Image (tube, rainbow, N blue to C red):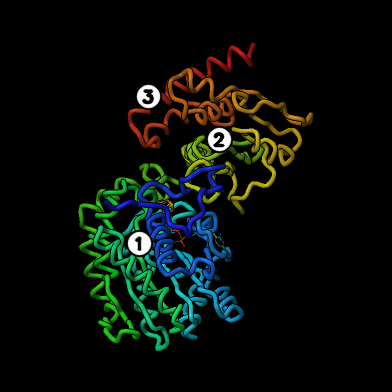
Amino acid sequence: MMTHTKPDAFYDTFERKGHNDKNTHYCPGCGHGTIHKLIAEAIDDLGIRDRVIFHSPVGCSVFAYYYFDTGNIQCSHGRAPAVATGVRRVHNDAVVISYQGDGDLAGIGTAEIIHAANRGENITVFFVNNAIYGMTGGQMAPTTLQGQKTLTTPLGRDSVRDGLPIGMSEVINALKTPVYIERVTLSSAKGVMKTKKAIRKGLEYQVDGRGFSFIEILSPCPVNWKMDPVASRKWLAENLEPIFPVACFRDSCTNSSAVISARAALEVSELTEAVESSPAASENAGHLPFMGDDQLISLLNGEIPLERLETIQLAEDQLVKIAGFGGQGVLSGGVLLAKCGIAESLHTTWLPSYGPEMRGGRAYASVILSNDEIGSPVVDNPNVLIAMNTPSLEAFENDVVPGGLILVNSSIVSRKVSREDVQVLYVPASNIAKEGGLTAAANVVMLAVYLHHTGKIPVERLKDIIPATVKRKEFVEENLKMIDRTLNYYDTHFRS
Ligand SMILES: Cc1ncc(C[n+]2csc(CCOP(=O)(O)OP(=O)(O)O)c2C)c(N)n1
Ligand code: SF4
């Protein structure tokens, strides 16, 4: 009987998620978890745990040091190969790992990886290519496929505007010094087994002092690809693998290399045409994040006439900060408010900010509504703060401008606002939402109170945009009812 156990190279518990927690912060189906396990197993097999110095990047794997019970260094974005070089040169006996995502390695850290490879540093690089910026919510990465829809390419990556996806294994293969370059995939069980072998080989070569190893791992990001874990592995096989062919590009140590050349750009274009017309791509097309509504597209296309751009006159810009923890609808609340502004033809910005976890971490959204063009989307001193939990109130209460408005989710925040020069409304938003049968709609409750109380934008606008914005159609009606329930609450408790 085979028993699956936790590798010794992992800590017993992962304190990032709380005391005694055995779960990682990764989303279900994310490739990072699988890759971590394979690396930890290889470290165990080679008996090198006490020698490993793991360099974790900026990206979803920024917290790798919470998992690997090895030496750990967290590097700034893209710089892991440079830091690893320094460590390599002063610790002769260390086994140095540089673990990097595609935004990190192929975007911001292009220079570092090329020069570390070219110097033939005796380090092992694990390059996790999920074709997107995962941690920041799904922007285009250098490896994003042509036609692939991301947060920053809502109509698909366009090679004329954005260039073609970069094959980093092919780029590294153009250098003479690396000893081992292989691209593997997590799309299937067989692919995972090959990945395991490649990871082990890359570490072994370093232990033997042979030189620079580069292992590119095609890895799913179900959350930002807007698919479930099973569909994402299929999409990986059908779409990423044709553009980034799985292959051993160089294995100088066994002399059995099957060196393949980079694909010509034209050939890639032909392949991407196939991607764009594939069922997986059209499935993806239904999930345009935040930009999917006709109105925004029309606005961007200039179909909404410019003369409609000054309908509402705001006495002052609305500088709104909505803050809480991930899962309270803080970011989507910001989107709803921003869309209300757009629907009123106001100049509008929405700027999300959140911790590395896709769920449960700290989060806030800054929204600006203005009659004038907006210079910066950053809101340092809001005139409206919507505090969904206590840490948010504590973090931002003192930033609110005198005379500003603070809405406190009094279902969760037990303390009172200490400022006396601001207006405060204590709204039991979570309770109102729960009693209305949709706990997740506390954000809508707060927005309805804000709009109704200030009269800046008719609350009707919120009702107008909800059907096109709320992703799960079965919740549209509940959200609309929640607004009426909130207005009743407001009229009873604040107007009387
Ligand atoms: C210098 C700097 N620029 C930008 C950022 C914002 N940022 C954080 S993670 C990230 C993208 C990471 O994407 P990737 O390397 O593909 O890793 P993934 O999250 O997909 O694992 C960016 C741009 C930052 N933290 N620091
Ligand atoms: S956002 Fe993507 S890469 Fe990041 S943890 Fe989630 S699935 Fe993984």
In-image side of 127 versus 366 (left or right)? left
Whole-Å distance between the Cαs marked 2 and 1?
35 Å
Q: Residue furthest front?
A: 1
In percent of width and height, residue 345 lies at 49, 41
Whole-Å distance between the Cαs marked 3 and 2?
27 Å
- Mark number displayed over residue 11: none
Dot 1 crowding, Cα within 10 Å, few <14, some 14–19, many 20+ = many
Q: Which residue matches tag 1?
A: 157
Type of amino acid under label 3: Glu
N-terminal of the pair, mark 3 or mark 1, is 1
Q: What is the secondary structure assignment of the residue under circle 3?
A: helix
* Up-down relation of residue 80 to residue 480 (above or below): below
Q: Which residue matches tag 2?
A: 312
Quadrant hosting residue 152 = bottom left
Q: Which residue matches tag 3?
A: 477
Type of amino acid under label 1: Arg
**Which residue occupies 46% across, 22% down?**
482
Q: What is the secondary structure assignment of the residue under circle 1?
A: loop
* Up-down relation of residue 262 to residue 465 (above or below): below
In percent of width and height, residue 446 lies at 56, 28
Type of amino acid under label 2: Ile
Nearer to the camera, 470 or 413:
413
In percent of width and height, residue 106 lies at 44, 70
Q: Is residue 351 something one can see in this rendering? A: no
Dot 3 crowding, Cα within 10 Å, few <14, some 14–19, many 20+ = few
Q: What is the secondary structure assignment of the residue under circle 2?
A: loop
